Image (cartoon, coloured by chain):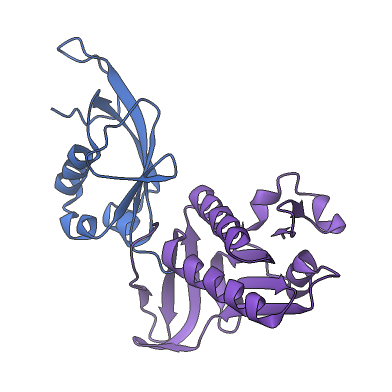
């Protein structure tokens, strides 16, 4: 399971934890209370999908999360991608540049 | 301001290099976009056509009268995406290309995005410029929020980032 925390803790089953940074933009940033980013500590082998489920639950933002793309370290990824230590995850709403 | 010359290497105006050691910092900027500089980036004595596209802030939208626009970006990724677009263009056309997107608070009439393409003849320059602005609008992680005359602010709805 996922450990969603902002303070470093050791995993209870001996697996190492990973630290990630998650970035929020535009309407999604506003729906999570206006924060640009937060740092999270997760269990190793946490998938993007699991992370999204936790974010949706934490912020009641499931509507916004349906239409977003995800990048890890500036590369677009699938939701079954496993996260690694020090990853920078960005939740990208549909773009509107120009 | 950056651009790619025919040989794939980057050209910078000498004056621009003074305060910007990393030329990638110039594709997404809070600064006012200089048309003269972006044209200078793509100039080439063997190229007889330059096409410039400018996107500006309109005073109206589907939501009503607009007084300004706020742009924000995942800057690091946006710069990488813009470089990727430039690279694709170099593979498709014998052309120079320069792309700059402004972010922050803009007024009606301000230039938000500039794309400049040069080539030996107009056809390739038009095609490269059209491709570039379409790609910028489709994949680069930039978002805009309309400031309306009735004091509401609304994020413009768009399509998914990346390809």
* Horizontal arrangement in the rendering, residue B160 relative to residue B67 (left or right): left
* Front-lying residue, A3 or B92: B92
Give the image location of residue A98, x and y in percent. Answer: 50, 72
Identified at 72% across, 72% down, the residue is: B119
Front residue of this view, candidates A75 and B109: A75
Q: Is residue B136 visible?
A: yes
> Taking B28 as reference, is A50 above or below it?
above
Image quadrant in which the N terminus of chain B is located: bottom right
Q: Is residue A24 left or right of residue A45?
A: right
Q: How many marks?
A: 0
Residue B127, how many percent across, how many down?
58, 76
Where does the image place residue B24, in percent across and percent down from the top left? 65, 50
Quarter of the image holding residue A77? top left
Looking at this rendering, what residue extends furthest in the top direction?
A: A14
Q: Quadrant of residue A18?
A: top left
**Residue at point 42%, 76% (across, down):** B146
Tell me what residue is drawn at x 44 percent, y 58 percent.
Answer: B141
Q: Determine the image quadrant of residue B103.
A: bottom right
Q: Work out which quarter of the rendered image holds the C terminus of chain B and state it.
A: bottom left
Chain ID for blue: A
Whether residue B156 is situated above or below residue A27 in the rendered picture:
below
Say if residue B29 shows up in the picture: no
Relative to B76, does residue B2 appear above or below in the rendering?
Answer: below
Chain B drawn colour: purple
The front one of B150 and A49 is: A49
Residue B73 in the image: state x and y as whole percent: 48, 57
């Amino acid at each position: 399971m996922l450990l969603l925390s902002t303070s470093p803790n050791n995993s209870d089953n001996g697996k190492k934890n990973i630290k990630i940074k998650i970035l929020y933009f535009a309407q999604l940033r506003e729906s999570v209370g206006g924060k640009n980013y937060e740092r999270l500590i997760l269990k190793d082998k946490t998938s993007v999908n699991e992370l999204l489920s936790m974010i949706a639950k934490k912020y009641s933002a499931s509507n916004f999360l349906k239409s977003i793309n995800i990048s890890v370290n500036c590369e677009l990824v699938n939701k079954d991608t496993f996260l690694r230590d020090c990853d920078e995850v960005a939740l990208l709403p549909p773009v509107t540049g120009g | 301001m950056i651009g790619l010359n025919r040989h794939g290497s980057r050209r910078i105006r000498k004056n621009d290099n003074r305060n910007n050691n990393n030329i990638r910092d110039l594709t997404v900027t809070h600064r006012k976009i200089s048309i003269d500089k972006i044209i200078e980036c793509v100039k080439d004595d063997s190229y007889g056509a330059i096409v410039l596209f400018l996107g500006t802030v309109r005073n109206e939208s589907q939501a009503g009268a607009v007084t300004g626009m706020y742009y924000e970006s995942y800057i690091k990724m946006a710069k990488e995406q813009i470089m990727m677009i430039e690279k694709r263009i170099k593979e498709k056309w014998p052309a120079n290309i320069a792309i700059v997107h402004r972010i922050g608070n803009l007024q009606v009439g301000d230039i938000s995005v500039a794309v400049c393409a040069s080539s030996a003849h107009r056809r390739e320059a038009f095609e490269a410029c059209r491709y570039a602005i379409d790609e910028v609008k489709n994949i680069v992680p930039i978002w805009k929020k309309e400031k309306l005359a009735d004091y509401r602010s609304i994020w413009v709805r768009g399509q998914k980032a990346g390809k």
